[in-house]
Amino acid sequence: SRVAQTTSATLKALGLDSYNLGVYNGAWGGSGSIVETLNPATGEVLGAVQQASARELSETLDLATAAQLTWRTLPAPRRGEVVRQMRQAIADKRQALGRLVALEMGKIEAEGVGEVQEYVDVADFAVGLSRSMAGKVLPSERPGHAMLEVWNPLGVVGVISAFNFPVAVYGWNSAVALTCGNAVVWKGAPSTSLTSVAVTKILAEVLEANALPGALCSLVCGGEDVGAQMADDRRVDLLSFTGSTRVGLQVAQRVQARFGRSLLELGGNNAIIVHADADLDLALRAVLFAAVGTAGQRCTTARRLLLHDSIHDAFVERLVAAYKQVRVGNPLDPGVLCGPLHSPAAVAAFEQGIEDVGLQGGRILCGGRALRHLPGFFVEPTVTSIAHDAPVVLREVFAPILHVSRYSNLDQAIQWNNAVAQGLSSSLFTASPEHMFRWIGPEGSDCGIVNVNIPTNGAEVGGAFGGEKETGGGRESGSTAWQQYMRRQTCTINYSGALPLAQGIKFE
Ligand code: UN1
């Protein structure tokens, strides 16, 4: 069939087979259990990956630790040059890699290619960083003393990423962590293991061409057991985790128990507020991308829509009409905007969410059904009308369900925006500067991402990405997020020949 042909051509273009080794640390291995990944649009097996055993993870951590000892001595701009070559190698495989993401994760191809572009973009950012990650010179209170803030590499950075962004989230972490002088050990989601192997093959070639140890970009495919071992192992200096709030809390507690560092990107429950003075055409398009894009499986997906009384009815009418135009289907077909959910478990979670809406006094305005007659894991993008504080609205259901509530004044809507446990992304549609600045100020949104007149999702790499409260507090990608991948050292150098003590203490 056409899908089978596309699959084999895509795997071939990326150097993958039907069976692949899932461990890389300079050499390829894999002696743990075998995982088969599925095409969520058809339910068919795409290929198999043999994952890491506990011993292989341990050996990989030794190799990564050793590799970092030389990597850290290269000047940062030299490291940046290697990351630039990785950027180019990933960009050269943009189409094939984007298509593999569509095949294995289930997002539409344009979004698959988009997340490869996000890796390319963050690598560009990291190359610039390699010549600009600046320390500081601070004023010392003591004569003849210089006080410096110096940033040094941490060592080994572990990255655990999720199925929904199998390329970009690793890109954010690895491009920045490598530039900062660390080795990276990656465990992707088991259900997107082929993508993890494909990305690692590309990076391994670059390392080899530069005569650098492959363990700098180590891969340890595996499930929760491998993740738990990474959390517990002292050789992992920083563990960057993207996934659910439930698992993130366990990971953070295990890492904390050994006083390691963690960086958390957990659940979101993001709202869009459309105010009375909003540009409704703009808002409509934004809501559609935010709620239906990636079939509702971004951590930045809009799950709540708060509409001002004065525009509520007209906006809902247009929204429902727009939803009815959305084509659900194979993510490789042009014109399809909504692919399948990633797994049968996600379909079950969708159905539970829909059932809860009914039980909690809500109504389905459109959608609401799992398309169980199709071979893949498809559901209808859904809009509901429900109280802003119904329990189902307060939890993250990782599916295309958008809950609409009505408000009468903006402060109330902002309060509702903030009244959930998660704090990732938020958007306000308005034409008024006074509303915009209130929204981004101390009485505004409490999220890490606070937008005006754009969707909640689709953030650029140049800003720091992450959120507050149950979202975990971490920041990745742009701005000063690089500092989390380094040790901050305050260095005071006395060149005076005398020994004046701080705070004027006399000790003689
Ligand atoms: C995620 O869903 O885990 O802002 C990351 C966005 C993307 C990244 C999402 N740039 O939607």
Image: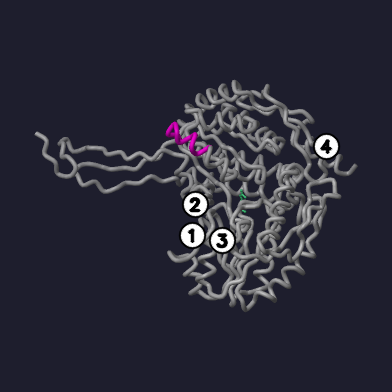
Q: Secondary structure at mark 4?
A: helix
Question: At 79% from the left edge and 30% from the top edge, which residue is drawn?
Answer: 18
Q: Is 155 positioned to the left or the right of 292 in the image?
A: left
Q: Are marks 4 and 3 in contact (CB under 8 Å)?
A: no
Question: The C terminus lies in which quarter of the figure?
Answer: top left
Camera sees residue 480:
yes
Viewer-closest of 279 and 33 = 33
- Percent of width and height locating residue 38: 77, 39
Q: Secondary structure at mark 2?
A: strand
Q: Amino acid at mark 1?
A: Asp
Q: Is 465 positioned to the left or the right of 330 in the image?
A: left
Question: The N terminus lies in which quarter of the figure?
Answer: top right
Displayed quadrant of residue 286: bottom right
Q: Earlier in the sequence, mark 3 or mark 2?
A: 3
Q: Are marks 2 and 1 in contact (CB under 8 Å)?
A: yes
Tell whether position 259 is magenta.
yes
Q: Earlier in the sequence, mark 4 or mark 3?
A: 4
Q: Amino acid at mark 3?
A: Ser
- Percent of width and height locating residue 146: 26, 42
Q: Is residue 462 above or below residue 345?
A: below
Query: Residue 446, labelled with which disc?
Result: 1
Tell whether position 270 is magenta.
no
What stretch of residues is rendered in magenta? 251-260
Query: Residue 8, labelled with which disc?
Result: 4
Real-space Cα distance between discs 3 and 2? 14 Å
Query: Residue 426, labelled with which disc?
Result: 3
Q: Amino acid at mark 4?
A: Ser
* Residue that numbered label 2 is attached to: 469
Real-space Cα distance between discs 2 and 4? 43 Å
